[in-house]
Image: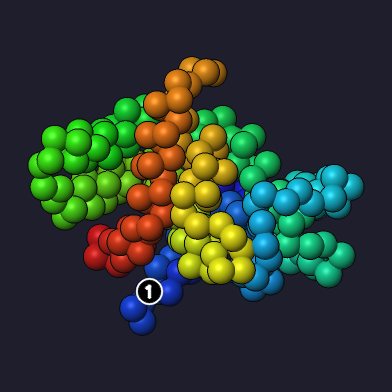
């Protein structure tokens, strides 16, 4: 972030939400919003390995690190692939390992209450996740909000992309929310995906929270 970070601005309720994110994330995200909203299978369909390598090299170049990239030779599938590969190469998931258990707990509690027939108080879960997201280290905090907003955008265009929030949660679970262990049980996989699906669907809540802090 010191050398290859930039400010990305989300627009919510006539307000601007500035987020500090890596240049590669903001540049790919902007292009994907502009050109990929109707791309079927975005994030699932692979891009060209040759073009992806070219993009990775350009995003590694000092001075602007791809901020003024000309997307003309590339496709939205190339951009989506580069974004996912970048996230997959981070030292930890976007939600740090030290927060993993805490992020599972509110949805796990909801599932337990639902199975017992107990009324689920959604405001409590929203408040719990707003607190968890705000407690993340600043770089993780901003990156998670940006990505949740991006995934919510594609989920809202699921008629064209064929990807609802549940599918996007499944695709991005390894990069966003994973334990330190290499192998996860099926139950843990499902719980992680349920958490991310909830966070994607509630993404506006966290973005708006930025304007009140």
Q: Is residue 177 above or below residue 7?
A: above
Q: What residue is rendered at 15% in x and 48% in y?
A: 120
Image quadrant where residue 102 sits? top left
- Along the line of sight, which residue is nearer the eye, 17 or 178? 178
Q: Is residue 78 above or below residue 179?
A: below
128 displayed left or right of 141? left
90 displayed left or right of 209? right
**Is residue 6 in view?**
no
Q: What residue is rendered at 23% in x and 52% in y?
A: 126
194 displayed left or right of 89? left
- Along the line of sight, which residue is nearer the eye, 179 or 192? 192
**Is residue 75 in view?**
yes
Q: What residue is rendered at 52% in x and 49% in y?
A: 167
Packing grade of label 1 (10 A; few <14, some 14-19, many >=20) is few
Q: What residue is rendered at 62% in x and 37% in y?
A: 88
Residue under numbered circle 1: 12
Residue 194: image x %, image y %? Answer: 38, 42
Q: Secondary structure at mark 1?
A: strand
Quarter holding the C terminus? bottom left
Q: Is residue 104 above or below residue 167?
A: above
Image quadrant where residue 113 sits? top left
Residue 41: image x %, image y %? Answer: 66, 56
């Amino acid at each position: 972030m010191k050398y290859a970070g930039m400010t990305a601005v989300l627009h919510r309720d006539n307000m601007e939400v500035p987020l500090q994110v890596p240049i590669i994330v903001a540049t790919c995200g902007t292009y994907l919003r502009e050109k990929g909203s109707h791309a079927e299978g975005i994030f699932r369909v692979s891009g060209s390995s040759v073009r992806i390598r070219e993009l990775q090299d350009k995003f590694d170049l000092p001075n602007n690190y791809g901020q003024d990239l000309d997307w003309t030779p590339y496709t939205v599938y190339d951009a989506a692939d580069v974004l996912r590969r970048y996230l997959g190469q981070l030292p930890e998931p976007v939600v740090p390992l030290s927060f993993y258990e805490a992020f599972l707990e509110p949805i796990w509690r909801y599932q337990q209450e639902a199975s017992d027939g107990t009324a689920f108080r959604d405001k409590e879960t929203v408040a719990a996740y707003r607190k968890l997201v705000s407690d993340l280290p600043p770089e993780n905090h901003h990156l998670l909000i940006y990505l949740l907003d991006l995934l919510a955008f594609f989920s809202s265009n699921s008629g064209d992309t064929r990807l609802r929030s549940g599918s996007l949660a499944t695709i991005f679970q390894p990069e966003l929310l994973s334990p330190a262990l290499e192998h996860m049980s099926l139950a843990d996989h499902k719980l992680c995906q349920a958490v991310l699906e909830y966070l994607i669907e509630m993404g506006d809540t966290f973005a708006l929270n930025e304007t009140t802090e």
